[in-house]
Image (spheres, rainbow, N blue to C red):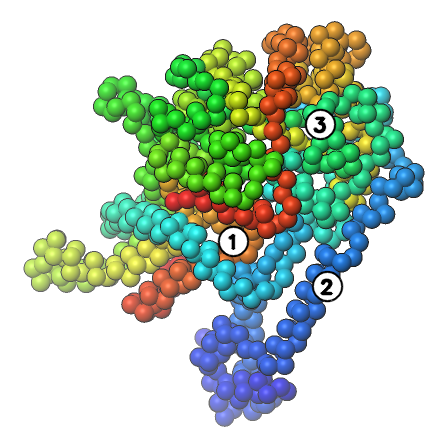
Amino acid sequence: MEQPVPPDHPGRVTNRHHRRVGRALAPYLLSLPSGLWLLLLFLVPLVLMLSLSLKTCSPSTGACVMAWHWGEFSSEMSLYHQEFITSLYFAAASTVVDLIISFPIAYWIAFYGGRRKNFFLLMLLVPFFVSFVIRTIVWEFVLSNNGVILGALKHIHLLPSGFHILGTSYAVMAGLAYNYLPFTALPLYVALERIDRRVLEAAYDLYATKRVGFMKVIMPLAVPGIFAAFLLTFIPMFGDYVNQEILGGTSNTMIGTVIQNQFLVTLDYAGGASLSAILLVVALLGIFLYARLLGSRTIEQYL
Amino acid sequence: MSEEFKVFAEGGGVDPSFWRGLTEQRFSRRGLMKAAGAGAGASLLLSSGAGATALPNKNVGTAKWWAKQKLHHTVNFANWPLYIDVLNGKHLSLQHFTQTTKIKVNYFEVIQDNASFYAKIRPSLAAGQSTGYDIVVMTNNNPELGYLMQNGWLVPLDHKLMTNFNKYAGPLIKSPSWDPGNKYTMAWQSGWTSVAYNAKHVKNPGDSIQILFDKKYAGKIGMLSDPFELGSAGLLAIGVEPFSSTEKDWAKAAKKLQTQRSDGLVAAYYDQSYIQHLKNGDTVVSQCYSGDIFQANLNSKYKDLVLMVPKEGLMLWTDNMCIPLYAQNPLDAMELMDFYYSPMTQAVVEYYNDYICPVPSAKQQLLHPTGWDAAALKAMAPSIGLATSVTADSPSVFPTPDRVKLSKDYYPFKNQEEINAWNNLFLPIIQGA
């Protein structure tokens, strides 16, 4: 097999200067596509959104004028801080529910899935081939007052007739937990799957019980995966509005709903953009904390 | 070779600072100044375009302009869903129009609500281009119709081409407060926003809008999520005419609605879905749109739903046909709009629609059809499933004088500040956490 020639090999003198420039440029040229991608589809929209939040826009003509209106952030926060808190609470609670549900699933597939691991993973994902909105609307039927479940339970008098779930915070959290389950299960699976079984065997050889092996070997090695799963689930849930729109009631508005209304109902683009910016800052804070606690490398492995 | 480039070339290999460089923006001072200058120039242009200069429709819609227009035998009509006669997926009234005028109609049911539809056509209008529609239908109880007028984005109508309108238009929609002299608009249909209740659960409903604030029905009261409908109901409830209300009144109304909410009276703030919740018993009293209740009653299952005529008043809204500026076929559009003011056409539309008819004489036409409408009404009868006289006698379609007297107009917003003030009062009630 041909070995790559070291760049400073004395045998290679032709075109030396030319090659040196080429070598120096290579990494930049190679990263150009992804750099352009980041610039055009991430940085530019981000800057546009941030600048939009400082402008004053006319809902009538759609014209926006830069006003450096920093007060927009505080006035939006004073109006809608409660919705932020609700969103934080719903997203955190539903993420914890997802972790509790998907840990055993991921654990079982990773350790006992055998040859059929891929099949089980596929089964986990099959419901998610259906559109997000349709899945949520189906939940509306499942949870409705006289639907399949509540109707039957009421019929046999296990529940009082006035009992309802639709419109409550529990309905929203159930919808969130259901819709984002794969975002938790897959990173957890990756984390558990890559645990070196020899380490576990070594623990058993040293007379660790199954319980101790789980607590002292598997859990610590799974922690970065759990954090990644938490972040990957929590952040999109935080800005979600579909679940609240379809399953929620009057007292559980999430910040995503407010932003959606500002863009589509009141045509208040500046207000919507500034709330989105605040949402983004909170999400970035989460990632920053993660990177600080666990290092920035670990998150990449689960994406 | 630029200064920066040299640094890279000499560094060689993948330097960590390169990756930082990718994620950090580096501005030169001059570049920044240039960008700021360009921005300032752009904003200046915008502000002068919106303010001082003449409206873009200055020379449009004059007699001279209309004289130059020609028929193109096609018209693009954007309307709300389920708002025109339907038989087996076809619209008989539109078919008849095409037969008699040889104008082909492309009918689009694309308007779900005023704001989002306006946001879709606004960029075209702001850029001075056709929206693709020759007729759009906008409601007077939302700010968007006003925006279209203020920005000069509508074509002033040619009153010479409004023979049917001038002859048959009813007093409720002729020269209305939101468009004096029908300069830009002709009504498509109107309706009332009022209160409906379920007679099975509500005994002694009375005749007051205060029923929406009755603790007896706590948790079973439905309100509308449209801030203009919600606010207007609040104003009626504190005994103020919405049309002539002041910002002080709005604050009082908002307080009343906030209390209604915090006392747990409201089940939820609904869009069009309120009717579903009223039907399945989630709510027993609800804000409602008149036509929905009439249509629900046609099903024997929902005979118990009753439209109340509160003594405080009924909010009268109207969906208005208008021609957006830069429309390709304005003359064809005028033909179509006036065609819908023929009593025969309205009889066919109303037999399906059940909203307030802009042409009162369509009532006689429903009872004794005389022309092409006879065949159309007969063809539709099996699918509608009720006699044309039921539609003709409905006070929700052909309002009785007492209902006309109780009909109230919405507040006419004078500027954006007022709209913002209204939204800031009533939106937090709807979307409060």
User: Does residue B184 appear in the picture of this structure?
Assistant: yes
Indicate left or right for A31 with A232 as reference.
right
Q: Earlier in the sequence, mark 3 or mark 2?
A: 2
Callout 2: SS: helix
Q: Residue at x 86, y 47 (%)?
A: B59
Residue at mark 3? B173
Write the residue at 59% across / 64% down. A67
Quadrant containing the N terminus of chain B in the rendered view: bottom right
Q: Amino acid at mark 1?
A: Gly
Residue appearing at x 25%, y 60% in the figure: A223
The residue located at (50%, 47%) in the rendering is B424
Q: Residues within 10 Å of mark 1 (few under 14, many from 20)?
A: many
Residue B82 in which image quadrant = top right
Left or right, A206 with reference to A19: left
| Relative height, residue A44 to residue A276 (above, below) | below
Cα–Cα gap, marks 3 and 2: 39 Å
Amino acid under disc 2:
Leu
Determine if marks 1 and 2 fall on one subunit.
no
The chain letter under disc 3 is B
Q: Which mark is residue B45?
A: 2
Locate residue B329, reporting x and y percent: 82, 38
Residue B120 location in percent, x, y? 65, 45
Q: Secondary structure at mark 3?
A: loop
Relative image position of residue A194 (x, y in whole percent): 29, 59
Front residue of A277/B246: it is B246
Q: Secondary structure at mark 1?
A: helix
Q: Which residue is mark 1?
A: A272
- How far, Cα to Cα, is label 3 from label 1? 36 Å
Amino acid on which disc 3 is placed: Ile
Work out which quarter of the rendered image holds the C terminus of chain B and state it.
top left
Viewer-nearest of discs 3 and 2: 3
* Marks 1 and 2, how far apart at CA: 25 Å
